Amino acid sequence: MAPGALADGAFTRLAAHSDEEMVIVTARAGQAVDGCLVGFATQCSIDPVHYLVCLSKVNRTYELARRSSALAVHVLHDTDEDRRLASLFGEHTEQDPDESDKLGQCLWTAGPWGLPILDGHDWFAGEIVYRYDVGDHEAFVLAVGPGGTPVPEGPPGHSVPRLGFQAVRALEAGNPP
Ligand SMILES: Cc1cc2nc3c(=O)[nH]c(=O)nc-3n(C[C@H](O)[C@H](O)[C@H](O)COP(=O)(O)O)c2cc1C
């Protein structure tokens, strides 16, 4: 059997049941800003603190990220507002900026590196220290830098859960792969 032949079917089933925490990644290149919903993201080093974000090569956010030195990452919780943002940033593309204005439908300010920082969300930004071509996505490794935590932490076990993949899996991506 060819390597990966069986694993592919098994992996598809496992991936369908995974529940990665979703984030919104924002980018700036010159005056252009954008952001998209991302599931392929995780901390990937403790010392130094590095965070991995994989951006689809068909996304406009990716086009900006390629010309950027940093990205910002926003944590999502399972609230009505964050589900709205997941739909806004996951189902709409700025490939044609005349058709969509995602950031125009949000409150945000310019943060470090001029990156769009969404109001009321826990976030961090990081300089892009490595980039890898990993297939139809490109992996950006961020050296985690400044951030903000405006969302109050509840007592352990009582905070609002993060927004996971299963909660948004029915969304239709703005740029299908
Ligand atoms: C559930 C879900 C998960 C997604 N995960 C990713 C991801 O990990 N990386 C990515 O680049 N795009 C991901 N997308 C797709 C983008 O968020 C989407 O295509 C967006 O509309 C792109 O906008 P842009 O072209 O303005 O950047 C995901 C979309 C959905 C609905």
Image (spheres, rainbow, N blue to C red):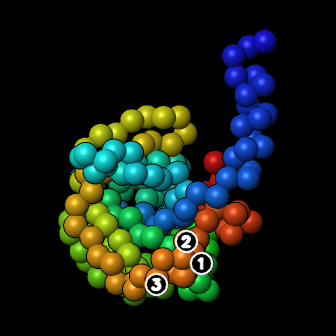
Q: Closer to the camera: disc 3 or disc 2?
A: 3
Residue visible at 54% across and 76% down?
Answer: 157
| Furthest-front residue in this view | 156
Mark 2 crowd level (few <14, some 14–19, many ≥20, 10 Å Cα) = some
Q: Earlier in the sequence, mark 3 or mark 2?
A: 3
Q: Earlier in the sequence, mark 1 or mark 2?
A: 1
Q: Give the amino acid type for the residue marked by disc 3 in the picture.
A: Gly
Instruction: Say above or below: 153 vs 96.
Output: below
Mark 3 crowd level (few <14, some 14–19, many ≥20, 10 Å Cα) = few
Tag on residue 96?
none
Q: Earlier in the sequence, mark 3 or mark 1?
A: 1
The span from disc 1 to disc 2 (Cα, nearest Å) is: 6 Å
Residue visible at 73% across and 53% down?
Answer: 17
Mark 1 crowd level (few <14, some 14–19, many ≥20, 10 Å Cα) = some
Q: Is residue 64 left or right of residue 166?
A: left
**Which sits in the foreground, 44 or 40?**
44
Instruction: Say above or below: 100 vs 35.
Output: below
Residue visible at 74% across and 66% down?
Answer: 170
Q: Could you say where residue 67 lies in the image, as x and y percent from the top left? A: 29, 51
Tag on residue 78?
1
Badge 1 vs badge 2, beta-carbon distance below 8 Å: yes
Q: Closer to the camera: disc 3 or disc 1?
A: 3
Q: Could you say where residue 136 lies in the image, as x and y percent from the top left? A: 55, 39
Quarter assignment of residue 166: bottom right
| Furthest-top residue in this view | 1
Residue at the disc numbered 3: 154
Q: Could you say where residue 77 lies in the image, as x and y percent from the top left? A: 54, 76
Q: Give the amino acid type for the residue marked by disc 2 in the picture.
A: Arg
Q: Could you say where residue 5 lies in the image, as x and y percent from the top left? A: 76, 22
Residue at the disc numbered 2: 162
